[in-house]
Amino acid sequence: MNRYFHRFVTLTIFSCCFSFVFAQNKDIDKGKEVLKKAFEQKDAAKKNEMIQKSIELFTKGGLKKEMNLIIGDEFLEHNDLTQASSYYNRCDKGEKANGLERVAQAYQDQAFGDAKNEAKLLRSAMSFYTKSGKAKDGAKSIGDKYFEKGEQFYPSAIDYYFMAQDSAAVEKVADTYVAKGGEAAFKSIDILKRIGSKSALEKAGNICYDRKQFDRAYECYSNGDITAGLEKIADKYNEVGRTTEAGNIYVKIAENYMKTANTDAVEKLGTDNVKAMNFSLASRIYDKAGNMNKSKKYLAYNKFMELDLDSAKMLLTEVGELDLVKAIETNMKHLDNIKNNVMVLNDFVQNQPFVTMESDPETGKQRPAVKDENILIEYYKGIKDAIVETFHGISKSTLAISNPELKKMLIKHFQQYPAGTKVLDPTTFAVRLQKSTAQVKDVYLH
């Protein structure tokens, strides 16, 4: 008897629970039905009344916060984003974030179909992306939309990619400009500089360098501290005669190497400049490396090339280069003659009228501006023969120097004058042009 009684009670309780749940589900289903019909109403008051009725049914059916998601979705489906966001804000954390993200996406979709209100709608989209915790994803999505619209909209795409902190996407735009070639490639430079990473600046520098925009390349390489790029620029500046600027870059490179204790690289840099007879620069590099003996030695060589003979002898004595000291003293007669000729050349250089300089688009070398060419022609026309005669004297005295090392340094020094490689043979330093055969442009000194 007991056993049957317990079974009866259990079945009764189960039946009651089932009935209760069934009743709740009916209320929820009815609430959804009423909610759907509410959005079919033309009359706003009737619509609101039915929404309120659906809320009562959802509550009766046991839905509390859950009903806010259902109602929010209905408002979203009917593009009432204000009400949708209001209901999503009442949801639990996860559902709230998801709902607000979908509101943001809806604003985004509206924006790209409404050019007049695009900016305003995108601000709303970003606001809701931020509230949903998806600001970066949202900005990337908007950036992609702009990128898909074509080149005209790339600047807007870039702004949103930066907002998304997505450097790879920004570089994608830069690469697209580069692929187009021509002037479009230069648009990528500012984009890459705006990214500002080492790799981006190196890429920007390479784009400039390949298009012979060496000063812009230097700016990029310098800002990124790109040693390999800086070396390319320094070599190029040396090649086109901008030796002072090249020297400053080489010293910066040496400093970079010393920061990482890369003494082998500094030594090679110094050796390369010694081979090129850039002794002033070699001295500065060895100074940065802390090799004071070599620094003084090559400073002495530079002083000799500048014909500051007393300083050269003093420094050579300090580093034990006594054979060169003796060679200088042995050849003082010829060196004094050369110094006198250099004084004449220096006077001509100092009196040269000012002209604007510009880069030759083919070689990159500095040359007088075309508009100022006649000023130089008139100046050098009156002193052409005197310059030719002066270089003849320099050639005679230099070739008479008995020490081959000193002779080699002097020849290198006089090759800095454009006339030095025209009037005299660059290799043998023998006379190549006479007064009668030299043209005005052959005797330019600076």
Image (cartoon, grey):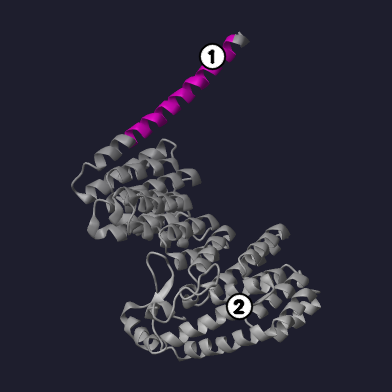
- Mark 2 neighbour density, 10 Å: few (under 14) some (14–19) many (20 or more): many
Relative to residue 439, is residue 113 drawn left or right?
A: left
Residue 243 on image: x %, y %? 54, 72
In this rendering, the answer to whether 319 lies above or below 60 is below
Report helix, strand or loop for mark 2: helix
Q: Nearer the viewer, residue 40 or 368?
A: 368
Q: Nearer the viewer, residue 375 or 26?
A: 375
Residue 8 circle label: 1
Quadrant placement of the N terminus = top right
* Observer able to see residue 132: no
Residue 370 circle label: none
Q: Gap between marks 1 and 2, in whole Å?
A: 129 Å
Q: Nearer the viewer, residue 159 or 382?
A: 382
Query: Label 2 belongs to which residue?
Result: 398
Q: Does the magenta stretch include residue 171?
A: no
- Mark 1 neighbour density, 10 Å: few (under 14) some (14–19) many (20 or more): few
Residue at 64 percent across and 83 percent down: it is 334
Q: In terms of image quadrants, where is residue 322?
A: bottom right
Counting residues from the start of the chain, the first of labels 1 and 2 encountered is 1
Q: Nearer the viewer, residue 366 or 204?
A: 366
Residue 367 on image: x %, y %? 40, 75
Q: Comparing marks 1 and 2, which lies closer to the viewer?
A: 2
Q: Give the range drawn in magenta.
A: 4-31
Residue at 41 percent across and 87 percent down: it is 354
- Image mark count: 2
In this rendering, the answer to whether 200 lies above or below 8 is below
* Observer able to see residue 177: yes
Relative to residue 138, is residue 424 drawn left or right?
A: right
Q: What residue type is labelled 1?
A: Phe
Relative to residue 425, is residue 338 drawn left or right?
A: right
Q: What residue type is labelled 2?
A: Thr
